[in-house]
Structure formats: C-alpha cells, structure tokens
Image: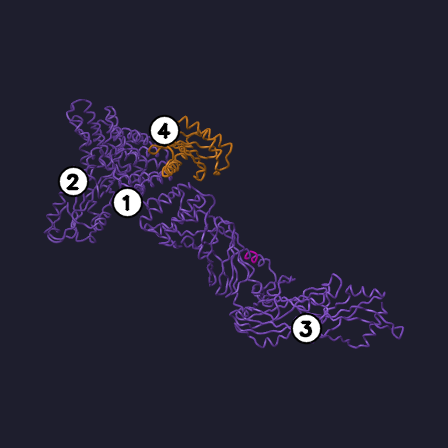
C-alpha cells in the first residue's frame, strides 16, 4: 500500500467503504451531481436494531490499498456503485459488460454492487432488477437515495453474516491465517500445526472480527475482541497485527468517547446527523444491546457474557490517556515494518486528530514530528505537496499556527519546485496567502498602524517578496503591484537603504505596465486585497488649513450675525449651546473659505527614503462641497527634514467642506491617504465653512506704492500702502482705481478711514472723499473699473519747535503758540525733488524733526453677488503714509516797540522752504497783530 | 565549534531582537537563502518553545524541534524573551553553557524588548 489517505480519522474504522465510479463517458458535472446525492446517505439505522451503519464513499480508490482489507476491514471496498450513460438498447450489453469489468477490479472484496443507468428507456429499463437501476435522465431520479439505502441494507446483511460466521468459528476448526500483501511470501512453508502459528491465526482472526463488529455497529463487542486479540498477538510477537489490534482498540474507544467525531468538518456533519442515535446510545449503547441479544456468539468463543455489563464496558474501553498510549505503542510496532509506512502515517494522523480534541498539542506535535520523517518511498511532487499541506492543516488543528504556516509555505514552494515541468504558480500563490496569518501578517495596511510591529519582519518581507514573484508568474501584475506596495508601506522601517532602492525600482518597473490603484482587488477564492495608500511616502506630520489672505477674508455683517444667533436658540446665552460649540470647534475652524476662491492647505512632509522622492499629482481629498483640486508635483530631497507643501484647490459650491486627506502618485502607485488613518498627525481641524462667492476688489492708486508697512492697531492687515510727501497745508488728490477682478458683480462699497494714533494735532479733514460719484458706477461688473478720489489735506501744527525758541531766547522773550501759516500752493507738483532743498537751511542736526508723519488707513468694505445676500463682505485696506513738512520757517523772531507801550510789533522772518511761490495771509492783519501783542503780554 | 549555528533572541511579538550566525571555519559566507531558511525554521519552532516553556521549570528547554538537519534548542528568560539556537550537530552541554553565558550578558545590558544593535554584545558573545 503506497497511497496514504491523509484525511483519515479514527471513526473511519467503523465505516464501510463504497466506491462510486463512472463507467463509459459520463460528464464530470453529472457524475458529481449523482455522487453528491449518493454520499448524502452516509449513515443508516439498520432495521429492527439500534445499530447504525456508517458509509464512506470514494470516487477513487487505489486497488492496491484494497489488498490491505483483511488487515483493517475499513480499507476494504465492500460496495461498488457505477454510474453510466446509455441511450440506446443497442449499447446496453456493452455497458453491462463494462460494469462487470469494473466489478472485477474490487471483485475479491465486494459484498454487493449496483449500476445506475441514465438515459435508457424502453423494454430493458422496465425489467425489474436489483443490481441495476434505470433513470431517464439526471434530473429525474428521485429514488436514488432510496436505492442506496436498500443497497446499504444488503451490504449489512452480508457484513452481519460474515461477522457471525467468523465469530462463531469453533476454536477447534482450522482458522485461516489472515495476512497483509507483503507477508504472503514470508509464510510459505511455515509449520501450520505449531501452537505459535495457531495463536497467531487466532489473534489475527480475533482482530478481524473486532473490525467487523465495529463496522456492524457493535462497538462493545469489538472492544472485547480487540482486547482478546491484543493478548493473543502479544504473546506471539506478531507486531504488525498487534499494532492493528491496538489501533482498533483506540478507534473503538475514540468512537465511544467522542461521538462528535475527530475528523473536523465531516465529523461535525456526522454529529448533526447522528445526534439522535448518540443520545439514545448514552443510555444503552447499540453494541451492548446487541451483545445481550446474541450472547451465544461470544460464549462459544469462551468469553464471558459479563463483558456487556456496565463494569465490563468501563474496563474494556480505553480512557482518553490510554488511547494515546496505545496509539503510541501501535505506531512503534508499525514502524518496525517499512511496508507499513502508510498505516503508520495514517495512525499518526488519526492520533493527532484525537489529541487535538483533547487539546494536548505538545503530544500531538510529537506525533506530527514523527509523521514528518516517515519515509514512504520516492514521493511524487504532488504527493509531497499534499503531505506538507496536511501537516500544515494538522498543526493548525492543534493551534500551532506558526508551524502550520511553515509547512504550508514548504508546500507552496514545492508547487513551483524546479523539478516540476509546469510550475503551479497559482497554487503556490494560494498556499502562500494562507500562510500569512501564521506569520502575523494581514493584507490590510490598516492593521499596521496599531502600535508596535508584530512578527518577524525579515520573514514577513521574504514572504511578501515570494507573493510578489508568484503573482507575477501567475500573470497578474496588479497583484504584484499591490503586494509590493504593501511591502514598501508596512515594512519601510525594516528595509535597508539598498532594499528600499531595490523595492522601489522593481515597483516602478511593474507600475510602468500596470499602475497601482486604490481599488479593492478581489481574488477568485473570495479574498479581497484592500488598497495600500502610501501614507509613508512621503510622511505627513502636520496638516494645516490656511485662512484666506486678509484682503480676501470674508466677514459677516454684524446685524445679520445677531439674527443668526437668535434663530439658533431663544436664549441669549445657554451653557449647553456654548458647550456644543466648543466641541465643534475641536474639528471646525473659525474662518471661512469662499466659493470660487483658491484656498490652501499646508502639509508638513518629509521623505524617509535615501533618495529623492518624486511625488506627482498630489492634491486634496475633500467631501461636503464640490471642490476643484489643483494637484501639485513635488520632489523631496533624500531624507529631507520637514518640508512645507501647499496644496490648493477651489471650492465650487458652498457648505461645510471637510479635508479628508490627500492623494498622491508615487512610483506609479495612486494613493488616497485619509487623515483619520494617519498616525501621529497634527491638524488644526479639517472642516471649514465655504460661503457663497464674493467679488474681489483690486485697488491701484495714482501714488507710488510704499515699501513701508503700517503697523495697524487692531489686527487688520493692510493690503497696499502708498506714501506721499506733502508740505503743510498742501492738498493732494489721490486717485484710486477700483477694479473688480472677481467673478461676481460688486454691488456695495463703503469707505471708512481711520487715522492711526498720532500725537500731532490735526486741523481739518485729513482725508475727504465723495463716494457718490463712484457709487454711481455700481454695480461694478467683473473686469470693470471705477475710480475713486480721495483728497489728502495736511494741516498740522509745526509750532514749538526748539530751534525757533532758541532764536527767541536771544531777546529774552519767549513766544509760543504761533499759529501755523497756511500756504497756498499755486502749482501742484510732486514734492520729491523739493525735499533736499530744505535741510541745508536748518543748522541743527534734528532736521527731520520738522518732518511729521501721518498715517491713516482707508477701509473699503465691499460686497456683492451671492455672498452679499448671505451677509458677508470683504474688507480691503489701503494704508496711507504721509510725510508732512512745514512749508514756511520762521527763521527769526524779534519784537519792535510799537507806538503804544502796551503794544509791540512782532517781526517774523519767513523763509519759504518750498520751490514754489506762496502767499502768507493772515486772516485779518490787524487782528493778528493785536493777538500777537496780547500773547506777548501774556507771557 | 564544528557545526553551523544560528542564534536569535526573539521578543514578545515574535520579533527578532538579535540575530547571529556561527559558521564552521571552512565555510565562508552563508547564502542569503540559507539565512532565510534559518529564520523560517526558528519562527516555526516558536510554537513548540511556547508550549514547552510551561512544561519545564528550567529556562533551558533542550531541543524542542527539528527540521531536516537542523535541531532547535531554546532558552526562555523570566521576561519571556526567547533564545533560539539552530544547530546541525547535537551538542547539548555546549549550547546550554552558551545560553547561560548569553543570559548573563543579556541581563546586564539589555533594555526591555528593544532591538539593540549591540556591537559590544556581539563581540562579547563571540568570546
């Protein structure tokens, strides 16, 4: 016997083996349809007794295994069912002949056989025959199951008669020596009359009867016979058969102890089917019942009928521990015979299944270890694969997942061994996939985000490489790309620099033919490969949503804000609402984006690779709002530090926009990286409100832009600055060109000015304008411009300047409170060239002290389009920086006594520091003098 | 030492924290494939190590597994760090002594479950 049945379990010892085979040309599909129906009849309650018959069906069974049928009767083919197609009466004799030929193969052991003929109708089909059943076609054969039941009953009758026949053999009769195929030649010429020989014959026969009893559903009897047999065979050192007797004892005990079965799935099915009989069996075992009915069979062999009592049963049946000991013993006997390798191997497998149920994995692993080294003969590659697979399955059964994975991988490697002409890459791949759990690997990259790395990275990487290779050889590049991406993503920390290069190079070569996607890859056997986003290429550390630049920031009109508040809640303040808002804030950001305007998100990224990383097509993934992402391409230097990347896009509708993540293309693999799944990322929130579109205003002025930026008092930023130099009293007209560069009409404009805090005392309006003219051009359509004129008038107090007072001190008279003069400018001309003119005139170092600065901000509040409807406006600020210089200097002040002693003349030397003609006019000359006199008197 | 040896310390998540190969004097470099095989065998043996450690009071578990020409001996520390030795010759005493020597070193300069690239550790082991 050379072909082991790795699926064997102890329960199989009580089954009857029936082979179902097609004869002639029967389509596989039809055959297996019938086979399935036949094999559903796997147990039968024999009429008039509580015994149960179990049937094991095979559609293929090597005849040389059949030759071991005397050794263990469950190996004997006792029934044959042939299935055939026959469409005309003409073919019938031929078909029937084939059936006979088929019967010959197992002829020596068959109890009975059946032929199922499909397609034949007419005269022949109407003859009632027991051994042949005719069916018109494969769909119309309801009675198949019934036929099988009848067939099994007929098998039972033969079995029962054989059992009784053997069991009642008088001890005086000559008992034939049963033997296994390889023993036959050893016994030629042996003395058949010796006691030794007789004992041997008895022992073997006893064991055989035990087998038959077990098959016939008489468990108790079989135990008794096995015990007897063990004693007999032990005394004559017939080790092979002793082993078989011991194994029989084990099988019977296992069946007794574990009615649920040890054979995994089949066992479970059996349990369902047999739940009723086993329940009954708990009260009175079928075997025991039978012994009571037919005690004579035993007593004639000199065995006490007492064995059927409860005490006897407990004695005969092995305890769970004993089962294992006896299995060990049996296996050690088997191992003495090279030709019994298959028996030994199968016994190991059976013992492991029992131990798995007993949860004794250490001992089970010993049996398996032994099984690994049983040398059958030169195994074919296919058998090797089968063997390693079953080892793996058994290790899995006892909970040794790593060991199981090891053998499964060996099996996978065997599938593609160089000696195989047609390597089975598909099978290899499938087996490799099954090993993954044993190596703590899953194919979902999400599992690798949780804390520390599990498993042996080097081994895992090797396995992934093997998967990549196998899938490539299978001709499925998408799988290769997926596995390679997975390797790169999850094992990045363990790859050496050289390996990183190698992996990315091969990934690029794969993706050049088959780009990596974000789709779930489904394998034919139902397994799904989740997508692998490259969240580590580059690594993103921080995500920050950026506010719009100040000039584009939308602002809510105050009154409307109030309304909104009141609609939300009837209360002015509620702690609950306040609390909720606080929570929202954790995710929501307190600025808004505007529909149609480019908005930015800043990522801080770094490249963990030892070479330059090219990231293409990097853009934002958003939800909630229609969003036009404007992808960027970047190139990060090798092992860069944190590197800011700004991703931009334009919201095309309004509402709450959530930045879910970003997408990239790296090494030809598309990735959608979601922020939620990124570990250790810092973000300032990811949800922003997008408000309806607003117009955009751009201003340009007639004055030169200033490099100086104003320091605004209240946080608002200035978008443009202009500066101008003016002489005191001068008025400058500032033409501001307003251009609507947005896409919405500009409907509303409000202009306010704010003079930044200054110590100077200002006379009159610094800035004055007439808005009406500008507003008449409104609404301002996109692309249109309007002008707006602002008058800048400088009227400052330049008195009390030290150099003047010094002059006055000469005469011992102090004068203060000089009103500034009001120069009139005849010519309006840029002041730039006039500037260097005045400094040489003043001797003191602080010549700039008479330049005074005025700063003001001109605010343009504007709105329009849908944003205006929602109550938003934008604010644009223009900073105005004015440097004012005095237009006249009083270089000398002196007094002259006047005619009256109460008056004096004040003499002022006036210097015109401008290049222009100017007129000094006092409002009323006389009054001025008078006032001056009064001043002097005051001091 | 006549045979080939492969020694590895395995952490709590089946992660190797220290690996080393000892080859007989004649053999120069082991093939890469060979190294992988060692790792696979050692990984598979962990099942047996984990079972065996509960059956013994000793830290040294003797030979727990074998595959083809390789024997797998193991040693489990109180902190459940597993020392695994693959060897192709039976040499129980030598391996036992080696394990206890390594354990001494291990106790002195190891951090919890960390993989440390101990050049010094390595050189100390070699001595």
Q: Which numbered marker is on residue A105?
A: 2
Q: Which chain is purple?
A: A
Q: Which colour scheme is used?
A: by chain
Of the image marks 1 and 3, the number of the one nearer the N terminus:
1
Chain bearing tag 3 is: A
Chain bearing tag 1 is: A
Indicate which label's residue lies in the foreground, 2 or 1: 1
Q: Which numbered marker is on residue A423?
A: 1
Q: Are marks 4 and 1 in contact (CB under 8 Å)?
A: no
Task: Give the labeled residue for mark 4.
Answer: B89
Question: Gap between marks 1 and 3, in whole Å?
Answer: 95 Å
Q: Magenta segment range?
A: A580-584
Task: Give the labeled residue for mark 3.
Answer: A731
Picture coordinates of residue A665, whole percent (x, y): 43, 55
Main secondary structure found in the magenta portion: helix
Q: Can residue A278 be seen in this view?
A: yes
Residues flagged by tags 2 and 4 on a common chain: no
Q: Which numbered marker is on residue A504?
A: none
**Colour of chain B as rendered:** orange
10 Å neighbourhood of mark 4: few (<14), some, or many (≥20)? some
Horizontal side of A702 relative to A382 (left or right) equals right
| Disc 1 secondary structure class | loop
Horizontal side of A166 relative to A9 (left or right) equals left
Check the picture and name the quadrant holding the C terminus of chain A.
Answer: bottom right
**Front position in the image: A865 or A727:** A727
Question: Gap between marks 3 and 4, in whole Å?
Answer: 106 Å
Question: Is residue A890 placed above or below A57 in the rendered structure?
Answer: below
Q: Are marks 1 and 3 in contact (CB under 8 Å)?
A: no
10 Å neighbourhood of mark 3: few (<14), some, or many (≥20)? some
């Amino acid at each position: 016997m050379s072909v082991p049945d790795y699926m064997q379990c102890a329960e199989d010892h009580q089954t009857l083996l029936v082979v179902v085979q097609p004869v002639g040309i029967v389509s596989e599909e039809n055959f297996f349809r019938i086979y399935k129906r036949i094999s559903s009849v796997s147990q039968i309650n024999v009429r008039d007794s509580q015994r149960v018959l179990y049937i094991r069906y095979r559609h293929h069974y090597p005849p040389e295994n059949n030759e071991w049928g005397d050794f263990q009767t469950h190996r004997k083919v006792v029934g044959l069912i042939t299935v055939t197609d026959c469409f005309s009466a003409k073919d019938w004799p031929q078909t029937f002949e084939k059936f006979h030929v088929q019967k010959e193969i197992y002829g020596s052991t068959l109890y009975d056989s059946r032929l199922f003929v499909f397609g034949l109708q007419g005269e022949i089909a109407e003859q009632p025959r027991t051994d042949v059943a005719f069916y018109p076609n494969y769909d119309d054969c309801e009675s198949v199951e019934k036929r099988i039941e009848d067939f099994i009953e007929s098998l039972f009758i033969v079995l029962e008669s054989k059992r009784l026949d053997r069991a009642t053999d008088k001890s005086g009769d000559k008992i034939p020596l049963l033997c296994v195929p390889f023993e036959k030649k050893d016994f030629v010429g042996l003395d058949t009359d010796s006691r030794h020989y007789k004992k041997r014959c008895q022992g073997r026969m006893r064991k055989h009867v035990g087998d038959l009893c077990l098959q016939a559903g008489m468990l108790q009897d079989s135990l008794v016979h096995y015990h007897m047999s063990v004693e007999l065979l032990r005394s004559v050192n017939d080790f092979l058969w002793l082993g078989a007797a011991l194994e029989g004892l084990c099988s019977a005990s296992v069946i007794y102890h574990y009615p649920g079965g040890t054979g995994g799935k089949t066992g479970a099915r059996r349990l369902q089917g047999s739940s009723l009989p086993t329940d009954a069996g708990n009260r009175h075992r079928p075997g025991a019942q039978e012994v009571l009915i037919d005690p004579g069979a035993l007593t004639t062999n000199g065995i006490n009928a007492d064995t059927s009592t409860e005490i006897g049963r407990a004695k005969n049946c092995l305890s769970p521990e004993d089962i294992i000991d006896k299995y060990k013993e049996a296996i050690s006997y088997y191992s003495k015979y090279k030709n019994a390798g298959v028996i030994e191997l199968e016994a190991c497998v059976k013992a492991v299944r029992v131990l798995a149920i007993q949860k004794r994995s250490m001992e089970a692993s010993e049996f398996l270890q032994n099984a690994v080294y049983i040398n059958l003969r030169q195994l074919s590659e296919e058998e090797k694969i089968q063997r390693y697979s079953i080892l793996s399955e058994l290790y899995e059964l006892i909970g040794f997942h790593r060991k199981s994975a090891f053998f499964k991988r060996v099996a996978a490697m065997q599938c593609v061994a160089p000696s195989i002409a047609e390597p089975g890459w598909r099978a290899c791949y499938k087996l490799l996939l099954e090993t993954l759990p044993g190596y703590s690997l899953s194919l979902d990259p999400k599992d690798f985000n949780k804390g520390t790395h599990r498993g042996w990275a080097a081994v895992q990487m090797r396995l992934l490489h093997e998967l990549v290779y196998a899938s490539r050889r299978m001709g499925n590049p998408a799988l290769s790309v997926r596995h390679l991406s997975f390797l790169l993503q999850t094992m990045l920390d363990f790859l050496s620099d050289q390996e990183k290069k190698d992996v990315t190079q091969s990934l690029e070569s794969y993706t050049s033919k088959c780009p990596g996607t974000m789709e779930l890859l489904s394998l034919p056997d139902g397994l799904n490969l989740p997508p692998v986003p490259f969240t580590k290429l580059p690594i993103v550390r921080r995500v920050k949503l950026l506010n719009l630049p100040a000039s584009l920031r939308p602002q809510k009109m105050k009154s409307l804000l109030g309304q909104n508040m009141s609609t939300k809640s009837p209360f002015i303040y509620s702690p609950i609402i306040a609390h909720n808002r606080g929570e929202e804030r954790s995710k929501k950001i307190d600025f808004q984006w505007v529909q149609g305007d480019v908005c930015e998100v800043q990522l801080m990224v770094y490249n963990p690779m030892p070479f330059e990383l090219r990231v293409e097509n990097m853009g934002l993934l958003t939800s909630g709002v229609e969003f036009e992402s404007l992808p960027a391409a970047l190139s990060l230097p090798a092992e860069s530090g944190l590197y800011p990347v700004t991703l931009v896009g334009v919201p095309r509708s309004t509402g709450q926009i959530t930045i879910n993540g970003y997408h990239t293309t790296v090494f030809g693999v598309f990735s959608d990286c979601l922020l939620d799944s990124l570990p250790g990322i810092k973000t300032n929130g990811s949800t922003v409100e997008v408000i309806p579109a607003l117009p955009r205003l751009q201003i340009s002025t007639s004055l030169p832009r200033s490099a100086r930026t104003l320091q605004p008092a209240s946080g608002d930023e200035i978008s443009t600055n202009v500066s101008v130099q003016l002489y005191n009293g001068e008025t400058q007209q500032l033409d501001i060109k307003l251009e609507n560069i947005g896409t919405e009409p500009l409907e509303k404009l409000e202009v306010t000015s704010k003079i930044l805090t200054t110590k100077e005392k200002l006379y009159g309006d610094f800035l004055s304008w007439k808005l009406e003219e500008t507003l008449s051009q409104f609404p301002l359509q996109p692309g249109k411009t309007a002008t707006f004129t602002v008058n800048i008038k400088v009227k400052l107090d330049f008195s009390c300047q030290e150099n003047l007072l010094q002059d006055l001190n000469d005469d011992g008279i102090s004068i203060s409170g000089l009103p500034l003069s009001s120069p009139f400018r005849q010519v309006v001309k840029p002041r730039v060239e006039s500037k260097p003119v005045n400094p040489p005139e003043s001797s003191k170092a602080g010549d700039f002290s008479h330049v005074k600065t005025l700063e003001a901000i001109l605010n343009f509040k504007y709105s329009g389009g849908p944003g205006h409807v929602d109550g938003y406006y934008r604010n644009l600020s223009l900073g105005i920086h004015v440097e004012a210089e005095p237009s006249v200097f009083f270089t000398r002040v002196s007094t002259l006594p006047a005619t009256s002693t109460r008056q004096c003349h004040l003499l002022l030397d006036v210097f015109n520091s401008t290049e222009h003609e100017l007129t000094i006019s006092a409002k009323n000359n006389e009054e001025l003098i008078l006032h001056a006199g009064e001043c002097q008197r005051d001091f | 030492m006549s045979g080939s040896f492969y020694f590895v310390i395995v952490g709590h998540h089946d992660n190797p924290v220290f690996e080393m190969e000892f080859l007989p004097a004649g053999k120069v470099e082991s093939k890469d494939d060979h190294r992988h095989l060692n790792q696979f065998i050692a990984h598979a043996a962990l099942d047996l190590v984990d079972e065996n450690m509960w059956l013994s009071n000793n830290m040294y578990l003797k030979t727990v597994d074998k595959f083809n020409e390789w024997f797998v001996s193991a040693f489990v520390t109180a902190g459940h760090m597993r020392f695994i030795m693959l060897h192709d010759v039976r040499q129980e005493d030598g391996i036992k002594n080696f394990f206890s020597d390594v354990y001494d070193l291990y106790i002195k300069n190891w951090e919890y479950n960390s993989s440390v690239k101990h050049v010094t550790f390595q050189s100390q082991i070699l001595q």
